[in-house]
Amino acid sequence: MHNDQLTPGIEAGRLSADQIAENFADLHPPLNDHEALVAADRCYFCYDAPCTLACPTSIDVPLFVRQIATGTPEAAARTIFDQNILGGMCARVCPTETLCEEACVRETAEGEPVQIARLQRYATDRLMDAQPYTRAAETGRKVAVVGAGPAGLACAHRLAMKGHDVVVYDAKPKGGGLNEYGIAAYKAPDDFAQAELDWLLKIGGIRVEYGRKLGDDLTLASLQKGFDVVFLGMGLAGVNKLALDGAHPGVENAVDWIARMRQSPDKTDVPVGRNVVVIGGGMTAVDAAVQSKLLGAETVTMAYRRDRAAMAASEYEQDLAASKGVHILYNAAPKALGAGAITLARTKTSNGALVETGEEIELAADQVLLAVGQTLAGAPEILALDGGKIAVTGPGRTSVAGIWAGGDCASGGEDLTVTAVAEGRDAAEDIHAHLMGEA
Amino acid sequence: MADLRSNFLGIKSPNPFWLASAPPTDKEYNVRRAYEAGWGGVVWKTLGEDGPPVVNVSGPRYGAIHGPDRRLLGLNNIELITDRPLEVNLREITSVKRDYPDRALVVSLMVPCEQEPWEKIIRRVEETGADGVELNFGCPHGMAERGMGSAVGQVPEYIEMVTRWVRNATRMPVIVKLTPNVTNILAPAEAAMRGGADAVSLINTINSITSVDIDTFAPEPTIDGWGAHGGYCGPAVKPIALNMVAEIARHAATAKLPISGIGGVTTWRDAVEFMMLGASNVQVCTAAMTYGFKIVQEMISGLEQYMDEKGFSSLDEIVGRAVPNVKDWNELNLNYVTKAVIDQDKCIQCGRCYAACEDTSHQAIAMSEDRVFTVKDDECVACNLCVNVCPVEECITMKELPLGAVDERTGRKVEPYLNWPQHPNNTPDNCGWDPDPAEPVQ
Ligand SMILES: Cc1cc2nc3c(=O)[nH]c(=O)nc-3n(C[C@H](O)[C@H](O)[C@H](O)COP(=O)(O)OP(=O)(O)OC[C@H]3O[C@@H](n4cnc5c(N)ncnc54)[C@H](O)[C@@H]3O)c2cc1C
Ligand SMILES: Cc1cc2nc3c(=O)[nH]c(=O)nc-3n(C[C@H](O)[C@H](O)[C@H](O)COP(=O)(O)O)c2cc1C
Ligand code: SF4
Ligand code: SF4
Ligand code: SF4
C-alpha cells in the first residue's frame, strides 16, 4: 500500500521517486556554452558597474562576463573566486532579484537583466576540480574559527591563503552551515554544498573538527588560550518561540524540518503533511512551503500576519511559491491549534499598527511549520550584543579584542550567504593585518 | 605561469598591450590612469611642431557602425593630431615617464616634410626620457591635406627620406606607422626599412564615410551640413590589418622588420592573432575608447590563460607562429576535401544554412518536410558558407576526408597534395598561359 497526495496525516512517499527527483532538480539549470555566450553578449561592460556595487562581495561582474564572452570562463572563475570563494554556491542561492541583477542596467533598459548568477555558475563550474589558490608561506599564526558555514569558511580560506593555520569547529556532523542544512534543495542539488566544501579545504592549512560545539566542552577561554585570534561564524542556531493555544502533534520549526529533509539523499523518505500550513513570511517560510508542495502535500498555505508589501520574501520568491501551488495567505496571524487544524485571526494595518479584524479562519493542517525567525544562540556572554546579534564594528571586530565575528550571528548586513562570505573574508583580511602588524 | 613581459626594440613593458596614439593617450591624466589600469605601454597622441596647435572641429568627430544591440563595430573619426601645445605635452610626457619607468612610452610625431622640423622635435622628445618615437605617416584626413600623415605614407620615397632624417638624428628606436590607404603595403614597409626604421606599426585608419544622414543629405559626422571622409578603425578593420601585417611578416625583404600590430584589437584573442602573424606587440585604440581602460584586464588574463593552456612560457613562442602557414593561393592543396556536417543535436532548424546554400551556393543542403537539415555530400563543395551563417556555434563543422576516401561529389578518391600550378587543368596548353608554378611546399 503506498501513499499519495490524499493520504491523511504526515507521510513519506506521496509522489513517485521519479516525480520527486524531477521536482527537486536544479531550479536554474546550468547554461550550456551557447546560452552562456548569448547571455554574456548582453553585458555592456559598464563603468563602475552597478551590479558589482550591488554584490555584497563586490564581484567584478563586467570583467568576468567579458572573460566568458571571450572564451576564458576559467579566468572568469578566478575573477569571481578572488572576491567570493563560495561564488559557486552564491551563483545558486543569491536572491539576485534584490542584488546584482536588480541593479543591472539592462534590467532598467529592458526589464531583463544580464543573467549574472547563471553566468557566475557557468564560470565557477569550470573550476571546481582543483582548488585554484595556494597558500602563502606559513606564518605560524593560529586562528580558531567557530562555525563551518559560509562566514566561517570564507574566513578560514582567506586566512589559510595568507599562510595562517586555521582550525574550524562546528557543532554539526557536517560542514557548510545552512548551505548544507538550510538552503532549498532545488537550489543546490547533487550535494553541491559538500563538494564545494571539499574543494575549498583543498587549499590546505585548515583542519575542521565536527561535533565540537562552543559552549559544551569547547570554551571561548580555551580558544583564546590556544589561538592567536578567534573568529565566530556561528549563525543563528536558535529560533523565535511562538506560543499558541492548544496542542498539535505535527508542529515543528521549519528550519529543523528543512534540515532533516536536506539530509535525505532522494527525499522519498521525508514525511510531509497532506495539508501543510507554514507560519511566516521570509525566505525560510517560502522554502518550507515550496518543498512541502514538491514532496506531494495536497495543500500548502503560507500564512503571514502582515500584508504582501511587508513580506520579507522577495516578490520573486513569492511568485515562485505561487507557481509551485503554494497558497499565500496575507494578514493571517496564527491563533490556536486543534486536531488537524489551525485557527488564524485575520489582521489589518491600522495607523501603522497591526490589529485583528475579529474575523477568524480555520485551515486543515496535518503539519504546521513555524518559520518566524532565527535567533542567536550560544554566543559567549562576554560579547556585547546589538539587536540580538554579536555587536561588531568595521570588518567584524567584536567588543572583545582578539575576537572577530561575521555572518548571520554578527550585527549589520542582511542574513544571506553572500553577505556571510563578504563578512568572513573581510574579517580575515583584518585579522591578517592584525596578526602581521603584531609580528 | 606564462610570462607576459614584452621587449620591443629594447623597449620593455610588462605586457604587450599598448594604447595606440589617439585620444586615450592625449594627456597625462589619461596615460597615468591607463598605466594604473594595467596597460603595458602607450604611444602618446601625435605631436606636431611647436607653435599654435592645430584646431579641431567643434562639431561631432565620430561616425559609427553598430552591430545588433548597438555593439560598436566600426568607428570613423575626423580628429587631427594633438590640439594641445607642444610644450605642455612634452612636460607631461617627462613627468609620466619619470613616474612609470617600467611602462613603455613612445611619442608619436608628425611635422612638415622638411628635415629641420623633424630634427628639432626629435631633440625635444629625447629630453623627455621617452622610450622611442613613432612617425605618424598614416593620418588620412586633415593632416594629409597639409602634406603630412598619409600624404607622406602613400609615397615610399617620402617615407624613406623622412625616416632617414629621423634615423640620423636620434639613437632612440624609430617606429614608422603605416597607412593602409595604399594598394600594396610592402612598398611603404620596405621604404621605412631603407630609411633605417627599427620597426613599423600598422594600421592607421582607413579612408571612410560611415553613413549618410538621409534626411539632411549629408555624410556623417556632419559639420554644419557638410561632412568629410574620416579614418575608419575598430573591430571592422581587423581583417584588413591582419592581412597587411602578414604581408610584411612573410615577405623575405621585410620579414625581419619588427611589427607593432594595430587595428581592431578588442580581445586577448585578437592580440594573439596579430602576434601569430608577426606582430611583436599590439596597440589598441577603439576598444579602449568603447569600453574604457579596464578592458586590458581581460586581455591580460586571456593571454595568460591561453599561454598556460598551450604551455607557452614567453611571447616569443607566439610571435610569428602562424606566418609560415600564410601562403599564396597558388600553393594551397587542391586535393584537400572537406564536407559540411550538421550536428542535429545543436541545430535549431532556422534554415539559414539552407537559404544560403540553396539560393546562393551549391544546393547541397536538404530540407525535409519536418525541417531536418542535412548536407548532401554529393553536392557539397565545402565552401563553408553554411558554417558562417549558422547562428549556433559549432553546429555545422567541416569534416576532412582522409586520403583515399571517395569524394561523393566528384567520385574521385582523395589524393595527396596538389596545387594549382601542378593541376592538369592548368598546363599552358589548357589555360593558354604559363602558370609559373609556385614552389611545392612538401
Ligand atoms: C531555510 C533557509 C533558506 C535560506 N535560503 C537562502 C538563500 O536562498 N539565499 C541566501 O543567500 N541565503 C539564504 N539563507 C540565509 C543563509 O543561509 C545564511 O545567511 C548563511 O548561511 C549565513 O552563514 P553563516 O556562516 O553566518 O551561518 P550558518 O550558515 O548558519 O553557519 C553557522 C555554522 O555554525 C555552526 N554553529 C552554530 N553554533 C555553534 C556552536 N555553538 N559551536 C560550534 N558551531 C556552531 C552551525 O552548525 C553552522 O554550521 C537561508 C536561510 C535559511 C534558514
Ligand atoms: C579619434 C582618433 C584619433 C586618432 N588619432 C591618431 C593620431 O593622432 N595619431 C596616430 O598615429 N593615430 C591616430 N589614430 C589611429 C589609431 O592610433 C589606430 O591606429 C587606429 O584607430 C586603429 O586601431 P583601433 O582599431 O584599435 O582603433 C586615431 C584614431 C582615432 C579613433
Ligand atoms: S555573488 Fe551573488 S550578488 Fe554577487 S554577483 Fe554573484 S550572484 Fe550576484
Ligand atoms: S550592470 Fe548589467 S550590463 Fe552593466 S556590467 Fe553589470 S551585468 Fe553588465
Ligand atoms: S543554420 Fe545552423 S541552426 Fe540553422 S538550420 Fe542550418 S544547421 Fe540548423
Image (cartoon, coloured by chain):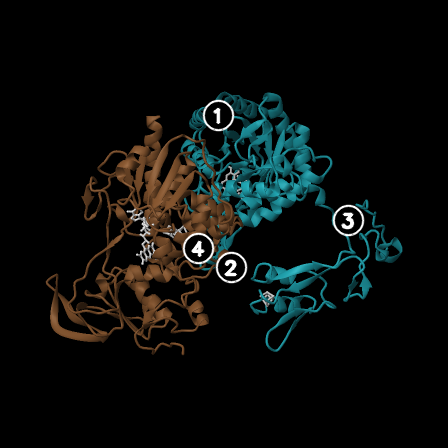
Q: Depth-wise, is mark 1 or mark 4 nearer the camera?
A: 4
Q: Residue at x 74, y 47 (%)?
A: B328
Residue B344 percent coordinates (x, y): 61, 67
Q: Which label was assigned to residue A192?
A: 4
The answer to whether residue B336 is visible is yes
| Residue hosting label 2 | A32
The answer to whether residue B75 is visible is no
- Given the image, on which type of amino acid does mark 2 rest? Asn
Please identify which colour was used for chain A in the image: brown
Mark 4 vs mark 2, CA separation in Å: 19 Å
**Front-most of residues A305 and B359:** A305
| Residue hosting label 1 | B101
Q: Residues within 10 Å of mark 4 (few under 14, many from 20)?
A: some
Same chain for labels 1 and 3? Say yes or no: yes
Q: Is residue B285 left or right of residue A393?
A: right
Residue at mark 2: C-beta within 8 A of ligand 5: no
Q: Secondary structure at mark 2?
A: loop
Q: Residue at x 54, y 25 (%)?
A: B117
Same chain for labels 2 and 1? Say yes or no: no
Same chain for labels 4 and 3? Say yes or no: no
Mark 1 vs mark 4, CA separation in Å: 48 Å
Q: Secondary structure at mark 3?
A: helix
Label 1: chain letter = B
